[in-house]
Image (cartoon, helix red, strand yellow):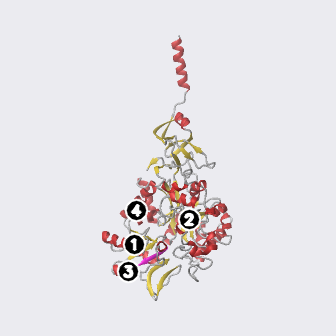
Amino acid sequence: MKKLLSLFALILIFSCQKEKQQVDTLVINANVYTVNSNFDKAEAFAIKDGKFFQVGTSKDLQNTFEADTIIDAKGRAVFPGFIDAHCHFYGLGMNLQKVDLRGTTSFDEVMKRVLDYQNERQTDFIIGRGWDQNDWEDKKFPNKKLLDALFPDTPVALTRIDGHAMLCNQAALDLANITKETKMDGGEIIIEDGELTGVLIDNPMELVEAIFPKPNRELQINALLDAQNICTNLGLTTVSDAGLHREVIELMDSLQQTGDLHMRVYAMVSNTKDNLDYYLTKGKIKTDQLNVQSVKVYADGALGSRGAALKAPYSDKEHHFGAMVIGLEDFKALASRIEAANYQMNTHAIGDSANRFVLKTYEKTLQGETDRRWRVEHAQIITDNDFELFKNENIIPSIQPTHATSDMYWAEDRLGAERIKGAYAYKTLLNASGKVALGTDFPVEQVSPFLTFYAAVSRQDVKGYPEGGFNLQDGLSREETLKGMTIWAAYANFEEDEKGSIEVEKFADFIILDQDIMTTDVKNIPNIKVEQTYIGGVKQ
């Protein structure tokens, strides 16, 4: 009788126990920063069908779920996948197929890299990018004379790191039909002593870019996959590509559909007639991996090439104000057209004059509208209380912290002691707008989101310069920085309901780091390594 009672008790116990639910993956024993609205911590989560299914404690989830895969994080820090809110993903990949001039410390080094590249490749048109005369002892723009001597018959076009200046040899200028008499608004063809120097600023560059050899499909695919490999290794799971043409967007879509391109892409459409006629008529395009609902527009040039449009002259060049690269009335008409199509407008604005014009145009165009999230890309120099214009709920500053630590060596020379106070003012922008979307602008800057985090918090370069930080009052806290690289970046892309935090029903995009970016000594941040990157619950 006792045996029967014991057997009955066991049956009763087992019948009362819940059968465990099947999920795809369990992550346990983790130090999880959920980045939800309360900035809660957790230690485990379950994944099913590519999305976060439940978040909680390791004990509760292991008691509730059976999983095909169990990942024991062993106490390591886990974060939502990083989102780069402003970069050039396709451009990064394409640059890997060209002469890499980043990090050159003299024009002679530029020439050596070009020669080495051509000796190896023997191309019919030499294209490179990455030089920055501000990193050289002689900080003047280079001249084409040496290029002409070395390459009298092969066209050469070398773009500055910011993409707003280009050095060409005579062969390239001839192919583009550029002479001393050529005139083009929105930029400059630099002439010295009555002769072409080969340097083009902003819009005139388009004349040379128009004669570049068209890349074939195989090269474009290799570029995208190369860029993906770099980005996922650094913990990026979504990139906002700031300016793409239709053929590249469609190539990305096809590669995502075949499963070759896993990276999620927020694709800003480049402002060209063909692109706008197609996309603004077609409407928004949205899949789990591709989001097309915005237009990238240029208002002015860059500070490094003195193309940024300023209210007062450059401190290091008399009577020079920079320039808008789009007509004022054209910009207003474009804003109205984008608004009517219910698209987002994302405008590159560096100088204080350009920023004010863009902000005032946004304000007027969006009057009476709500939740439009139009972005000012860079928002680099703000003066005369124009920060107040960012209080408009329809406007978001999209900023790149490493620009501050790259430019700090020469920015005050361009702007003077007073204007520099309103430059790279990220905390002031956050206080005005309530949110900032953070990116890198790679390949202008390095891809690493850890350098973004470090620059935002410390306002120093990786050598610890300057002591105390560059205008440290405009640094961001670690929590603010993390939000800017996750949930606020997602918000700027209209994607906060599907990514940017570790919450139920959002895509299971997350990363495991070898150090806790929120607590480690700030000097360690640039060297943090991504141990694992997951997109949709799949390890990359």
Q: Is mark 4 on a helix, strand or loop?
A: helix
Q: Distance between the residues labelled 4 and 2?
A: 36 Å
Q: Name the residue under label 3.
A: 146
Residue 411 point in image, percent of width and height? 56, 72
Q: Which amino acid does label 4 sit on?
A: Ala
Q: How far apart are marks 1 and 4 (CA)?
A: 25 Å
Q: Which amino acid does label 1 sit on?
A: Glu
Which dot marks residue 109? Answer: 1
Q: Mark 4 points at which residue?
A: 223
Give the magenta-colored segment's residue range.
Answer: 164-169
Closer to the eye: label 1 or 4:
1
How many discs appear? Answer: 4
Q: What element carries label 1?
A: helix
Q: Which is nearer the N-term, disc 2 or disc 3? A: 3
Q: Is residue 461 magenta?
A: no
- Residue furthest top as drawn: 1
Q: What residue type is labelled 3?
A: Leu
Which residue is at the front of the view, 347 or 246?
A: 347
What residue is rendered at 38% in x and 76% in y?
156
Q: Is 174 left or right of 493, judged from the image as shown?
A: left
